[in-house]
Image (tube, helix red, strand yellow):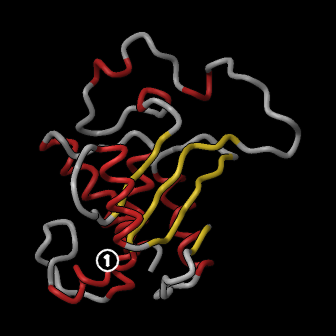
Amino acid sequence: MTVRPAVHLVASRRELARLAAATLDAAMAPPPASLGLALSDDAELAELNAEHMGEGGPTDVLSFPLLAPAAYPPHLGQDPDLHAGVAPLATQHSFALPPGRRLHLGDVVVSVERASAQAREGAGGHSGDVSWSVRDELRLLVVHGTLHVCGWDHAHADEEAAMRALERRILEETE
């Protein structure tokens, strides 16, 4: 986990690492695996958002998956055609890693500054109208970004409902 110099941590590194690990387990990511987590600010997220998403301004979380969504087991609401003819990662013959190395799944970058503003303004949570602590908002963003790395999305109503339900379950179980 990387914490940028100007970032004020509102949850411990250990708590966030355990939360990300619980999310990888819930998403059935292939073990053992690694995930990069960077806690940053609005300036960096705005730059990344423009460069990688073509969007202006900061966002709360960005995910950079290294594997295609079809590399993970299918989940509720996901387009079933996504997995047509694709073997799950566990059965694919992939490049052998050196001993002691883990498969890197991708990276999640969270703006703690944005999480703080959303929590302070009552614009947090799944719906953007939840008033809760900065810690709770940060926890949600870590879970949300990690699920995106694992092939989850919320572009369609069925998958969004399944993703939100899984986020709530993970947050409740790791509290």
Crowding at dot 1, Cα within 10 Å, few <14 / some 14-19 / many 20+, comes out as: many
Q: Is residue 111 above or below residue 76?
A: below
Q: Which residue appears farthest toward the right when viewing the image? A: 99
Dot 1 lies on which element? helix
Instruction: Identify the residue at horizontal 31%, vertical 66% (top origin).
Output: 60
**Tally of marks:** 1
Q: In this view, does 104 lie above or below 131?
A: above
Q: Is residue 90 left or right of residue 65?
A: right
User: Which is nearer the eye, 1 or 48?
Assistant: 48
Instruction: Identify the residue at horizontal 61%, vertical 40% (top origin).
Output: 30
**Which residue type does callout 1 highlight?**
Ala
- Can you give x and y, in whole percent of width and height, for residue 85 in the image? 42, 10
Q: Which residue appears farthest toward the top when viewing the image? A: 85
Instruction: Identify the residue at horizontal 43%, vertical 26% (top origin).
Output: 70
- Can you give x and y, in whole percent of width and height, for residue 96 in the image? 79, 26
Q: In this view, does 88 lie above or below 45?
A: above
Rendering quarter of residue 158: top left
Q: Give the position of the C terminus as an image quadrant.
A: bottom left
Q: Give the position of the N terminus as an image quadrant.
A: bottom right
- Can you give x and y, in whole percent of width and height, for residue 32 in the image? 70, 46
Look at mark 1 in the image and give the residue it sits on. Answer: 115
Q: Is residue 80 left or right of residue 14?
A: left
User: Which is nearer the eye, 172 or 118?
Assistant: 118
Rendering quarter of residue 118: bottom left
Instruction: Identify the residue at horizontal 25%, vertical 83% (top origin).
Output: 117
